[in-house]
């Protein structure tokens, strides 16, 4: 019995020494602070004090006052001043001429002319085709060069081919 009591005391001592390893150690706050400033403000002001750096920094602000300057008033005239005269030339217009051919299929030519030329209807297309068959060529319309050239190419790509030509507006044969 004595032996078991002795063993129980030894185990208790061992547990106490083992448990003391997890007990927090209290370090006095005064040994942590290096300055004499209070750690917390008084209760009236509340909150923690703002830490002050040991190194002093100087900040300077430079302010300049704006001086009033006289504003220039532009003279206004009733007529605007044109700095450059813009001269625009109208794009040269070209006539798209349908050339007459005895082998044309009337229905095909009228359909293709209405499909290709935006401002053409069936009556105008048949009239132009009849004039081209009689006189050899007839004017389909006046267009800027790029448009006239595009219409001529589209008529030439038709199957069977429709013959056309371009003439400058100012030239008369």
Image (cartoon, grey):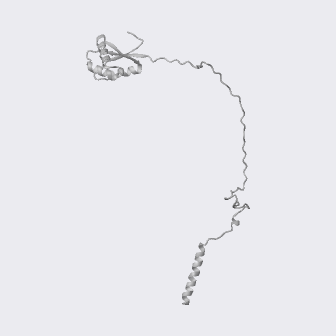
Q: Residue furthest front?
A: 44
Q: Position of residue 123 (x, y in %)?
A: 30, 17
Is the C terminus in the top left, top right, bottom left or bottom right quadrant?
top left
Residue occupying image coordinates x 71% and y 66%: 30
Q: Quadrant of residue 60?
A: top right
Is the N terminus in the top left, top right, bottom left or bottom right quadrant?
bottom right
Q: Position of residue 114 (x, y in %)?
A: 32, 21
How many numbered dots are placed on residues in this image? Answer: 0
In this view, the residue in front, 173 or 115, is 115
Residue occupying image coordinates x 38% and y 20%: 149
Q: Residue furthest bottom?
A: 1
Q: Quadrant of residue 11?
A: bottom right
Residue 156, can we see it? no
Q: Position of residue 38 (x, y in %)?
A: 72, 61
Q: Residue furthest top?
A: 173
Q: Position of residue 39 (x, y in %)?
A: 69, 61
| Image height of 63 relative to 161, above or below | below
| Image height of 64 relative to 139, above or below | below
| Image height of 28 relative to 164, above or below | below
* Residue 59 left/right relative to 155: right
| Image height of 80 relative to 39, above or below | above
In this view, the residue in front, 94 or 61, is 61
In this view, the residue in front, 36 or 3, is 36
Residue occupying image coordinates x 37% and y 22%: 150
Residue 108, can we see it? yes
Q: Quadrant of residue 144?
A: top left
């Amino acid at each position: 019995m004595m032996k078991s009591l002795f063993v129980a005391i030894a185990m208790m001592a061992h547990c106490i020494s083992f448990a003391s390893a997890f007990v927090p150690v209290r370090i006095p706050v005064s040994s942590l602070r290096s300055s004499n400033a209070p750690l917390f403000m008084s209760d009236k002001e509340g909150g923690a004090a703002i830490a002050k750096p040991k190194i002093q920094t100087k900040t300077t602000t430079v302010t300049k006052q704006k001086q009033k300057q006289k504003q220039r008033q532009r003279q206004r005239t009733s007529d605007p001043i044109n700095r450059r005269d813009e001269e625009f030339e109208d794009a040269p217009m070209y006539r798209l001429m349908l050339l007459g051919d005895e082998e044309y299929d009337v229905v095909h030519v009228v359909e293709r002319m209405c499909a290709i030329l935006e401002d053409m209807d069936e009556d105008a297309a048949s009239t132009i085709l009849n004039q081209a068959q009689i006189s050899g060529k007839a004017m389909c319309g006046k267009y800027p060069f790029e448009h006239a050239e595009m219409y001529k190419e589209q008529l030439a790509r038709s199957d069977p081919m429709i013959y056309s030509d371009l003439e400058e507006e100012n030239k008369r044969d």
